[in-house]
Amino acid sequence: MARRWNWALLPLVFAFYLFLSAPKGEEIPTDASNVLADLRPIQTTSLTALFPVTSLAALPNTLSLFLRPAGCVSKVVVVCPESLLAQCRATVRELVRSAPSHLHHPDISIHSWRGVGDSTAAVLQAAGQASTKWLLLMDNVGFDGLSERTRDTVLCPVAPNFPTGPRGVLENGSCVSPSPHPRLASYLMPPFTLPKALVQQSHRDWSDLGRTISQSRLDRLGGIVRGYGDHDAHWCNGVCQTDLPSSTGFFVFLLSDIDDLRTIMPLPCALDAVGHSVRILLHSHPAGTQPSICDLRYETIPYPLILEEQVDVVFAVDEHAVVSSRATIIRVPREDLQHVHWMETLTLIEWMNWNVPQIDVSIITHDRPQSLERLMTSLSQAKFFGDSINLRINMEQSSDLETIRVVGAFNWKHGSMFVHRRVVLGGLLPAVVESWYPHSNDSYGLLLEDDVELSPLFYAWIKMGILRYRYGKDRGRTGALFGISLYQQNNIELHPEGRRPFDARSLFKRSNVADPSTPYLSQIPCSWGAVYFPEHWREFHDYLAARLSEASMPIEQIVVPDVRSNHWTKSWKKYFIEMVYLRGYVMLYPNYEGFESLSTNHLEVGSHVKERSKEKQDVFRLPLMKLSDSGRLLELPGRTLPRWVALPVLNLTGWVV
């Protein structure tokens, strides 16, 4: 029988929801709208302005903004690419020399930038080295489109403890209308001011900076927007493409011989077909004939190779040395070459971020050595395409001798391996929650209990999804995405009446979804093989600590009405589901034909499974995508992962919302 609501505690639940789920994009309530007005302007020696140089013609106009009769900016950092460094220095010297003596002259320095990546990353890197208490961050647009009053407010701001500026973006990617009254935003676009203390780590872009800041605050505030008569919307029209490189780039394929080329030829041909420039280099003189898939030709080059030209991406067999100061270098083992064709779906910005995400694998095991050995075998047989993967194995205090032997005999060749064994029996909840913790916002955790088995192609699915939704064009819109499931749902377990069969393709046909084969978003967290994202896992730690402390409500209080997980008192998923419900978070799920999955569950007897009948095993065991079927990874709408806004969203009971 389902637990009945204690309606007397409803105000506590609502208050707890507000505590965890501050509204986004709403005007700040009246009692908080004076947060800026009550603050004094910052000290004139405490503000550093930073801006990038992408055009020498614009440099004098931007720099002259800080040469004023009176100013609050005490230091200016000009972030200049190395290719323009000499011209930047000459322009700065001439401008300072010719400026009238009665004007305020801040200290001006030049931060050289190699030009690797975009200008945003260069500005944020320079910001981390600034010495003043406050920063004014700008982009190559400067103050164009801003009213004089807004410009003056930005140049001599008040001193809040959060980012403040005239241009903000909501979590859904829409822009915040400027207003004299402060308004909330998920993140700000330049120009904006913020405390230097908030720029303590590397950030990819403005949205990443805003997410990091909001995750550190109880009110989830990423920035405050305030402007005066600013009607220019050009910055907003291109916000989804801000600081992204051109959609086409220059790729170099560095291979050993004609056999490598035959194996990989569909990939460079696909890149050439969508407009990329492609150059193919072979180290050994070809003895065979030219593959005829497309019109691309190869060259024979010496060894090793030093690339001096403007190359965006180098794809190399990992045994060959290649040096480039600018390009993203991707080294793939020869044995993986025949399985790389899924990479043709990547955009240029996704290719260029290939080496940014770090995916760690964390295995949770107790006393099922045969299951653990099966999982480890499937993990070892997977394709990682040259990436370094760190492995952590977490053993319970009461793990048996055979489990300890299996762990000790395991050889992991794809990265570092760390073994942890508890000294006090903790149970499954802390075993999972404490098994991994992110070290940065580019750190991702693949959590695996030992009754899971993996497809050899699981990593390709993970990498494709992370690059698309965390580093691609939609990266500013996907803050609600907390992870990627390997397991394909064929049952929904959260109905109060019990487990129900589920078929996403049938549901999407009934719901008139344009392409029923599309992957989808679901609020249900997967525990049978899934990657969790850093910001959300940190937030879960904070939520769980608050929940278990009973500081805001009794531990038995129901947070999510009418779901079966309310009875899972010893499961971490009960509390993760609560957080997902309160915050509106979602996980990406695969949706391949015939429930072909990237992981499966063998339903071993353990903490939450007391009976292991064949009928139950058949319910949860799914066919794994085989290595020989790597082409099936692209059985997606348009042979690519859909844009964020095109993904169907399902609630906790499996209905399209």
Image (cartoon, helix red, strand yellow):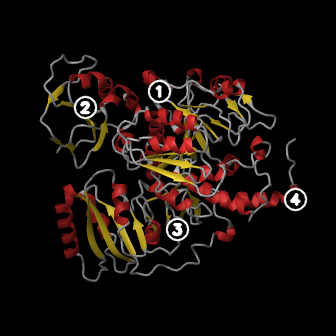
Looking at numbered disc 3 in the image, what kind of residue is underneath it?
Answer: Phe
Q: Residue at the location (19% across, 71% down)?
A: 93
Q: How crowded is mark 3: few (under 14 residues within 10 Å), some or many (20 or more)?
A: some
Q: What residue does disc 1 label?
A: 633
Q: What's the distance in space between the residues labelled 4 and 1, CA to CA?
A: 51 Å
- In the rendered structure, the answer to whether residue 359 lies left or right of residue 538 reads left
Q: Residue 8 carries which label?
A: 4
Q: What residue does disc 2 label?
A: 278
Q: What's the distance in space between the residues labelled 2 and 3, CA to CA?
A: 45 Å
**Sequence order check, earlier mark of 2 and 3:** 3
Q: What's the distance in space between the residues labelled 3 and 4, CA to CA?
A: 36 Å
Q: What's the distance in space between the residues labelled 4 and 2, CA to CA?
A: 67 Å
Q: Are marks 1 and 3 in contact (CB under 8 Å)?
A: no
Q: Is residue 499 visible?
A: yes
Residue 630 point in image, percent of width and height: 43, 24
**Sequence order check, earlier mark of 1 and 3:** 3
**Sequence order check, earlier mark of 1 and 2:** 2
Looking at numbered disc 4 in the image, what kind of residue is underneath it?
Answer: Ala
Q: Nearer the viewer, mark 1 or mark 2?
A: 1
**Sequence order check, earlier mark of 4 and 2:** 4
Q: Which of marks 4 and 2 is in front?
A: 4
Q: What is the total number of numbered labels drawn onto the structure image? A: 4
